[in-house]
Image: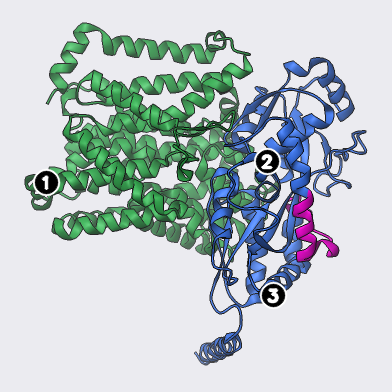
């Protein structure tokens, strides 16, 4: 305990220097502003801004990059709430209730609770990293391919619960998502699958392209045909910040979301993606009146947003304690560290204690700054909704195009958001939900990779999934969840509640 | 206040001077360096370190553009078709300019014919590493073990066409073993499972594995270079460990599109050579475990030769293993 306090005070000593405070603030601000552009998620933001850190000392540079990461992550939620475009996989769920709240004139409340929930989650996650980071690393190593596969199966069951319409439609959307995820080069053999010989499909479909199409562009198409809905967004602005009732309602969701997100964030291979989905599922399951979900329930924003931020934070654990990046953003952080002459690895903690503890302390400072930056900006974002839609939608479209082009510099990506936009529009017209499609897409890749990896390792024996206790446990949970969803009586209730 | 004014005036003067010098002279605007991999990987890091110093020499910023995809061939294809005016150059590597013709039958460029080679930047040595409780303790023991239990052993790699994949296939062909290949999407997840004892061994670049070796999370059997690395002085070379014919580094080199004028190539090569001679740049590359090319290896001609020998070396190895990515 004493050691922890002395370590943390070392960390705060480093992070609270004038220069590092300034860098943390700059990072958070730039990250937020760029992250708000649709499609420009944390990866693209950090990659673009990497060169500006070259002149800094390593600790300052990493503090700034981490700030950009949280900022962009948070900025992504802002677009999800305001214009229904998830910047990345973790903010898909935020669109469900967040954007509904915005349509009801509660955009300020949604943004406010997202900021406050994220701050709480960030604070708890920082303490978890400082106190338990090293022992929790073992959790990441327990998760082999078999465990991962079972976790993804559980995630797919969550997707069923996400849907607002019929179960059948939700399941078919999930399968379509999984199918889309198999486009591209086969991981084991290198064969191309379903690419029709087109070069830009060789590496599969980019998540951002799909998300921006089926959410963003489709949403614009729908708004353009329907004048009423967009007037709703424009006229009623309502309160800017959550009031006591909102806090009472959202508080427990924030706490639950934080812990779910924190645990899933530690897992390698993008486990953090599941956090917001899991949190949403749980909130909806335990809510007294689940029918409010998908129609602007504040818990549906508070829980997933907290989970999102907690996961973003704890995904630093494998990076800081092992030097192993659990996802693409962290891989970029590894690159940033190596460019600055620090090769990340298990020795960073002992060899560069100022860096290690400075970064941990800066996480909390960064979260505080995000709150300071974002609460006053809520008013500004909300006022953005007042902009007439005929000015707004070309701007959104343009930012989507710029954003998507900045990720891979591929013109075909820009064309594809149009294609997926049309697809998304048709799906909405026929009453299919895009959220389960995206979840299927995100999980599909991990599901397939880990299934095949596990089977190669077990030389084809399926028993590996039940021989390994963690994997067996996860599968069991999945089966129970599925049974609950399919039990006739529950399903009947569900249909009543969810059919619009 | 006066100081600031003087500094400003000096800065302006310098800017004007630089501008005048640049007139009618390459380069007059920023140069794009296409890195065909995601930001943060070994090739990207080397490109940024070398590019930073080259920018100083050239007097224009070198902007790194990451165009990832299809084992690096997407970015190289694009850059090879750019205007050969010296404003688009690229960082190619062992895969894109050595193994790609064997891996990608529909490759849209010929590594030996469609480029104006500029020069070799830096290489990262390959190490043979295994999970820490693997039954063998040195390379000899490992090769012995593979002879009798080869089919039970799992080898991890970072995806078809990745450096760890190619060097892994090469290693297997040298020791004549056939372990089960397990594919990961990137080095990170592969190392995670190596440390979690899920897979048995892999071959990968020093910058990726050195921290885990130093931290005792995995063990290294040998480094595939003629001399030991100062980063890992205790790890023997393959030759010292008794294995001949397995010496491999993931080299990275700067190329310009075919048709770039020799004067521009010379300027770029001079800047690259200067960067490699700079103590600070050198130190940063060495800290990563990188190998700096010798003086003789730094010329465009030497690079052209390297590309030709590399294509000739990888093609039979990969073809024999039946690997292709398309």
User: Which residue bears the numbered disc 1?
Assistant: A225
Q: Secondary structure at mark 1?
A: helix
Left or right: A173 in relation to B286? left
Q: What separation in Å lies between label 2 and label 3 (alpha carbons)?
A: 32 Å
The stretch in magenta equals B287-309
Asked if one can make out residue B7 in the rendered structure from this viewpoint, the answer is yes
Which of the two discs, 2 and 1, sits closer to the camera? 2
Q: What separation in Å lies between label 1 and label 3 (alpha carbons)?
A: 58 Å
As rendered, which of A253 and A72 lies closer to the eye?
A72
Q: Which disc, if any, is residue B102?
A: 2
Residue A365 horizontal/vertical position (percent): 45, 51
| Residue B154, quarter of picture | top right
Q: Which chain is blue?
A: B
Q: Secondary structure at mark 3?
A: helix
Is B288 magenta? The answer is yes
Q: Are marks 1 and 3 in contact (CB under 8 Å)?
A: no
Q: Are marks 2 and 1 in contact (CB under 8 Å)?
A: no
Residue A306 horizontal/vertical position (percent): 35, 37
Which hue belongs to chain A? green
Residue A444 horizontal/vertical position (percent): 43, 27
Residue that protrudes farthest toward the left in the picture: A228
As rendered, which of A180 and A134 lies closer to the eye?
A180
As rendered, which of A8 and B217 lies closer to the eye?
B217
Q: Is tag 2's residue or tag 3's residue first in the polypeptide sequence?
A: 2
Q: Is residue A457 above or below residue A330?
A: above
Asked if one can make out residue A376 in the rendered structure from this viewpoint, the answer is no
Q: Is residue A7 above or below residue B306?
A: above
Q: Secondary structure at mark 2?
A: helix
User: Are marks 1 and 3 in one subunit?
Assistant: no
């Amino acid at each position: 305990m004493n050691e922890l306090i002395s370590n943390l005070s070392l960390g705060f000593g480093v992070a609270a220097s004038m220069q590092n405070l300034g860098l943390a603030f700059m990072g958070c601000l730039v990250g937020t502003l760029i992250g708000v552009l649709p499609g420009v998620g944390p990866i693209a933001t950090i990659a673009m801004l990497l060169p500006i850190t070259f002149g800094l000392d390593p600790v300052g540079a990493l503090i700034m990059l981490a700030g950009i990461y949280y900022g962009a992550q948070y900025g992504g939620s802002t677009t999800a709430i305001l214009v229904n475009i998830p910047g990345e996989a973790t903010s898909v769920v935020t669109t469900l209730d967040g954007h509904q709240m915005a349509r009801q004139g509660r955009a300020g409340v949604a943004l406010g609770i997202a900021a406050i929930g994220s701050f709480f989650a960030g604070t708890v996650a920082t303490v978890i990293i400082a106190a338990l980071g090293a022992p929790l690393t073992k959790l990441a190593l327990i998760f082999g391919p078999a465990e991962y596969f079972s976790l993804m199966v559980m995630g797919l069951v969550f997707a069923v619960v996400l849907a607002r319409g019929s179960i059948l439609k939700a399941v078919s959307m999930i399968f379509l998502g999984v199918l889309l995820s198999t486009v591209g080069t086969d991981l084991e053999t290198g064969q191309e699958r379903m690419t029709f010989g087109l070069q830009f499909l060789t590496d599969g479909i980019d998540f951002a392209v799909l998300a921006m199409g089926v959410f963003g562009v489709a949403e614009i198409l729908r708004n353009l045909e329907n004048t009423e809905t967009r007037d709703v967004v424009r006229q009623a602005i309502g309160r800017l910040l959550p009031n006591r009732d909102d806090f009472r309602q959202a508080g427990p969701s924030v706490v639950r979301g934080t812990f779910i997100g924190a645990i899933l964030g530690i897992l390698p291979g993008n486990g953090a993606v599941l956090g917001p989905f899991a949190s949403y599922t749980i909130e909806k399951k335990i809510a007294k009146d689940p029918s409010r979900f998908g129609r602007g329930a504040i818990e549906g924003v508070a829980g997933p947003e907290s989970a999102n931020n907690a996961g973003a934070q704890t995904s630093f654990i494998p990076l800081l304690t092992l030097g192993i990046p659990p996802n693409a953003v962290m891989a970029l952080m590894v690159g940033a560290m190596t460019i600055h002459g620090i090769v990340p690895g298990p020795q960073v903690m002992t060899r560069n204690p100022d860096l290690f503890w400075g970064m941990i302390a800066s996480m909390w400072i960064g979260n505080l700054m995000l709150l300071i930056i974002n609460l006053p900006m809520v008013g500004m974002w909300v006022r953005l909704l007042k902009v007439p839609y005929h000015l707004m939608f070309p701007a959104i479209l343009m930012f989507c195009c710029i954003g998507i082009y900045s990720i891979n510099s591929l013109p075909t990506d820009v064309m594809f958001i149009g294609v997926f936009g049309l697809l998304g529009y048709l799906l909405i017209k026929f009453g299919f939900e895009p959220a389960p499609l995206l979840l299927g897409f995100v999980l599909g890749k991990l599901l397939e990779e880990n299934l095949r990896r596990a089977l190669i390792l077990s030389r084809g024996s399926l028993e590996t999934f039940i021989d390994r206790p963690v994997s067996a446990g996860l599968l069991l949970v999945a089966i129970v969840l599925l049974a609950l969803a399919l039990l006739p009586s529950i399903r009947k209730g569900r249909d009543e509640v969810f059919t619009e | 206040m006066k100081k600031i004014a003087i500094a400003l005036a000096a800065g302006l003067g310098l800017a004007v001077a630089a501008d005048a010098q640049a007139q009618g002279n390459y380069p007059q605007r920023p140069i794009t360096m296409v890195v065909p991999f995601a930001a943060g990987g070994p090739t990207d890091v080397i490109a940024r370190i070398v590019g930073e110093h080259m920018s100083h020499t050239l007097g224009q910023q070198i902007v790194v553009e990451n165009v990832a995809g299809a084992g690096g061939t997407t970015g190289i294809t694009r850059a090879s078709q750019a205007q050969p005016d010296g404003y688009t150059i690229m960082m190619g590597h062992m895969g894109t300019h050595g193994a790609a013709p064997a891996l990608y039958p529909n490759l849209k460029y010929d590594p030996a014919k469609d480029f104006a080679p500029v020069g070799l930047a830096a290489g990262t040595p390959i190490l043979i590493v295994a999970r820490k409780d693997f039954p063998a303790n040195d390379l000899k023991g490992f090769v012995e073990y593979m002879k009798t239990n080869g089919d039970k052993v799992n080898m991890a790699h970072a995806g078809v066409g990745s450096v760890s994949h190619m060097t892994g296939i090469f290693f297997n062909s040298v020791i004549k073993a056939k372990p089960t290949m397990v594919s990961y999407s990137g080095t990170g997840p592969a190392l995670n499972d190596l440390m979690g004892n899920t897979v048995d061994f892999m071959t990968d670049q020093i910058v990726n594995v050195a921290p885990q070796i130093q931290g005792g999370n995995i063990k290294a059997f040998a480094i595939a270079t003629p001399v030991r690395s100062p980063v890992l002085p205790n790890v023997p070379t393959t030759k010292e460990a008794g294995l001949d014919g397995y010496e491999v580094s993931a080299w990275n080199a700067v190329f310009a599109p075919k048709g770039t004028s020799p004067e521009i190539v010379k300027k770029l090569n001079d800047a690259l050579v200067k960067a490699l001679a700079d103590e600070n740049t050198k130190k940063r590359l060495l800290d990563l475990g990188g190998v700096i090319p010798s003086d003789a290896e730094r010329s465009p001609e030497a690079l052209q030769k390297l590309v030709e020998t590399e294509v000739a070396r990888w093609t039979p190895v990969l073809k024999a293993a039946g690997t292709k990515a398309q």
